[in-house]
Image (cartoon, grey):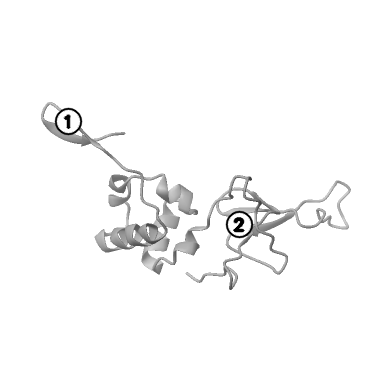
Amino acid sequence: MSTIIGPNGESCGRCYFFEVGDNGYGYCHRYPPTRHPDEDCCGEPVVTESMHWCGEFKPQLKDEPASETPLQTLGLSGRASKALLRQEIYTVEQLTAKREDELVGWKNLGILALKEIKDKLSKRGLSLKYSVPAIVNGDSEPVQ
């Protein structure tokens, strides 16, 4: 999967003008909404992927909540990226909300891909959601 983040880490998902939408897409509010000449109603903001970027990039203010970080910023292999995208994991925040035991059963996400994911997250000071085993009748089960 190719990365289209800017040369200095610019991305729509990290821009002041970006509004998070669904499935890795969102709305750019840098300019007024565009309107098609055949429409009578008001226009729409530009729809873009959070991993795209442009020359109008403006970093988010520090006191604002950060937009979701595109999964592509981790630089995962194609196999790991595709396995996560099949599970509708589009952002680093969605990934870190998952437990390791949840990822283990996913199609095409083997032990090597899981290790790669954990290593890439670790380099950013992040990790998967921790799952503490609970002891029930002497058996160990993951906490839900």
Q: Which mark is residue 14?
A: 2
Q: Residue furthest top?
A: 137
Can residue 122 be seen here? yes
Vertical comparison of 144 with 94: above or below: above
Residue highlighted by disc 1: 135
Number of numbered discs present? Answer: 2
Q: CA distance from mark 2 to mark 1?
A: 42 Å
Residue type, label 2: Arg
Using the rendered view, name the quadrant where residue 13 is placed.
Answer: bottom right
* Left or right placement of residue 6 versus residue 85 in this view: right
**Other-residue count near label 1 (Cα within 10 Å), few / some / many at <14 / 14–19 / ≥20:** few
Q: In the visual, does 110 lie left or right of 92?
A: left
Please, what secondary structure does the residue beneath circle 1 have?
Answer: strand
Q: If you read the primary sequence from the N terminus, does the residue marked by circle 2 or circle 1 appear first?
A: 2
| Disc 2 packing (10 Å; few <14; some 14–19; many ≥20) | many
Residues 66 and 37: in front is 66
Q: Which is nearer the eye, 40 or 89?
A: 89
Percent position (x, y) of residue 37? Answer: 88, 58
How far from the left and from the top, in percent, is residue 47? 69, 56
- The correct choice, above or below, for 108 with respect to 63 in the image is below
Q: Which element carries disc 2, helix, strand or loop?
A: helix
Q: Residue at x 27, y 59 (%)?
A: 110
On the rendered image, what quadrant is the C terminus found in?
Answer: top left
> Residue at 62% across / 50% down in the picture?
62
Q: Residue at x 13, y 32 (%)?
A: 139
Looking at the rendering, which quadrant does residue 53 occupy?
A: bottom right
What x and y, as percent, mark residue 66?
Answer: 58, 49
